[in-house]
Image (tube, rainbow, N blue to C red):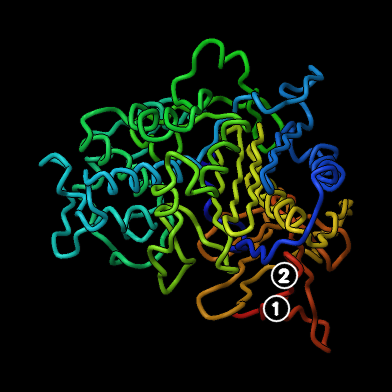
């Protein structure tokens, strides 16, 4: 089972690039979004989702699919979802607000606020709050002492004390300053801020963000009334999943919210000068670090290659989410979904952001699976290199052909011809090529309008 509370590592590391905004009328929002959203629902990629757009002072919220399979109830702006790793953006904004109020400093070492029994053991390379907030701490993606009693609610019994047990003995394998997406790091940041303030993370959330912005449906602990509006969670196979509780690393992924509230937060992230959290939002979105091996980072916000768009995504066992803001263009997009298909939901969010920016974006293509003999599939097994250090390993297993990119999970690929295959987890395809003797010598990866070639190596 994938124990991710984040989708920060997208398939093949595709990052959104959104460029400048062209004109599009509010009346056109639905007609532009419908074909992409309906494709996800009709293709059984998701059960339901809510899409929110803020543009030029106007908000529009659209619902698709179902809150619960078979009930016919369409989600709306008040439907509650787990937002997963978009929680990190809230944590980054809380940090910014605490810095502006003189409570902490970005360059403070995390050890300054941790109890003695939880001090990080690498004293030669202290990890700062800025390191944690920009995904450059050197801490791993996840701690290795996560052994859930309930695999369907894997973080429920992972406490702050267990996190302390891990970090006090962990020896960095990568120095702070390099990009390495870490749920652990952001969970630790949330805990550090809680310790400094002397109150639980949820109280920090309410005090620094929800109360100033009047976000009445953004919480970790749901009221009974909010529970009645909670979308039923589903896994990637559209089987009903479980809700997740994340007490020990709350700052990494514990928040539940609605599209209405998320649009308020997004609008506050755009209209700095007019909002109570203006300075904190501006600070959180400012480029704080440009690591040599990853994207420019604000405080938890990823900064797209266009230098304009700030974005984050998220995923839990039964939900996916995406949020992008373009402050200079007065544009924001929020997508909340009750299906654990974070790659597809992120691609959808990217496409909708491009559409709302006035770009021409082709619709996804519905692909049909064909049967290919095992003898042919075996010829594709091997390692294919895009560039030194970045490969795709293709294996033949009981369920068919699998592909794994360096540093990412293994995913199945499905044949639409003897040489052409596609991923269901993302809008990406592979074409295998042969040399003049008929031997497979390379593959081409098609994703996001880009084709990359990887040569087969020993």
Image vertical order of residue 75 relative to residue 381, above or below: above
Residue 370 horizontal side relative to residue 232, left or right: right
Instruction: Please tell me in which quadrant of the rendered image residue 58 appears.
Output: top right
Q: Quadrant of the C terminus?
A: bottom right
Name the one closer to the observer, 418 or 4: 4
Residue 8 horizontal side relative to residue 386, left or right: left
* Residue at image mark 1: 453
Badge 2 or badge 1: first in the primary sequence: 2
Image vertical order of residue 120 relative to residue 160, above or below: below
Instruction: Please tell me in which quadrant of the rendered image residue 251 appears.
Output: top left
Q: Secondary structure at mark 2?
A: strand
* Residue at image mark 2: 445
Residue at left 24%, top 47%? 167
Which residue is farthest left?
116
Q: Residues within 10 Å of mark 2 (few under 14, many from 20)?
A: many
Residue at left 36%, top 37%? 249
Q: Given contact means CB atoms under 8 Å apart, are the residues at marks 2 and 1 in contact?
A: yes
Image vertical order of residue 332 relative to residue 431, above or below: above
Residue at left 50%, top 44%? 274
Residue at left 19%, top 59%? 126
Q: Residues within 10 Å of mark 1 (few under 14, many from 20)?
A: some
User: Can residue 4 be seen from the camera position used here?
Assistant: no
Residue 237 in the image, given as x and y percentages of width and height: 70, 36
Q: Quadrant of the N terminus?
A: top right
């Amino acid at each position: 089972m994938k124990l991710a509370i984040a989708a920060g590592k997208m398939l093949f590391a595709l990052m959104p690039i959104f460029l400048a905004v062209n004109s599009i009328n509010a009346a056109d929002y639905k007609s532009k979004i419908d074909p992409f959203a309906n494709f996800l629902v009709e293709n059984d990629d998701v059960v339901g989702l809510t899409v929110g757009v803020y543009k030029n002072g106007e908000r529009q919220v659209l619902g698709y699919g179902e809150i619960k399979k078979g009930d016919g109830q369409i989600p709306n702006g008040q439907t509650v979802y787990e937002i997963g790793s978009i929680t990190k953006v809230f944590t980054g904004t809380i940090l910014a607000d605490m810095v502006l109020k003189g409570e902490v400093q970005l360059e403070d070492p995390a050890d300054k606020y941790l109890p003695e029994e939880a001090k990080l053991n690498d004293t030669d390379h202290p990890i700062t709050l800025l390191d944690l907030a920009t995904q450059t701490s050197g801490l791993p993606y996840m701690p290795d002492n996560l052994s859930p009693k309930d695999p369907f609610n894997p973080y429920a019994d992972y406490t702050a004390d267990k996190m302390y047990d891990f970090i006090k003995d962990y020896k960095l394998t990568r120095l702070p300053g390099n990009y390495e997406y870490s749920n652990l790091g952001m969970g630790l940041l949330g805990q550090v801020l809680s310790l400094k303030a002397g109150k639980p993370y949820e109280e920090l959330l309410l005090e620094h963000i929800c109360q100033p912005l009047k976000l009445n449906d953004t919480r970790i602990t749901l009221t009974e009334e909010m529970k009645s509006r909670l979308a039923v969670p589903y896994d990637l196979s559209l089987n009903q999943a479980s809700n997740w509780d994340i007490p020990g690393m709350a700052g990494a992924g514990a928040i539940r919210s609605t599209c209405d509230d998320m649009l308020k937060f997004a609008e506050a992230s755009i209209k700095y000068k007019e909002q109570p959290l203006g300075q904190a939002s501006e600070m959180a979105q400012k480029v704080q670090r440009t690591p040599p091996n990853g994207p420019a980072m604000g405080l938890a916000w990823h900064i797209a290659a266009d230098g304009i768009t700030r974005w984050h995504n998220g995923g839990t066992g039964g939900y996916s989410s995406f949020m992008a803001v373009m402050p200079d263009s007065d544009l924001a997009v929020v997508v909340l979904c009750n299906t654990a298909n974070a790659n597809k939901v992120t691609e959808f969010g990217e496409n909708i952001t491009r559409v709302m920016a006035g770009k021409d974006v082709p619709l996804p293509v519905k692909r049909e699976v064909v049967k290919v003999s095992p003898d042919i599939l075996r010829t594709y097994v091997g390692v294919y290199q895009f560039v030194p250090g970045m490969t795709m390993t293709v294996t033949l297993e009981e369920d068919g052909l699998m592909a794994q990119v360096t540093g990412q999970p293994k995913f199945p690929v499905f044949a639409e011809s003897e040489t052409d295959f596609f991923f269901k987890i993302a809008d990406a395809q592979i074409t295998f090529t042969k040399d003049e003797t008929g031997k497979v010598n390379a593959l081409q990866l098609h994703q996001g309008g880009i084709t990359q070639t990887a040569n087969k190596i020993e």
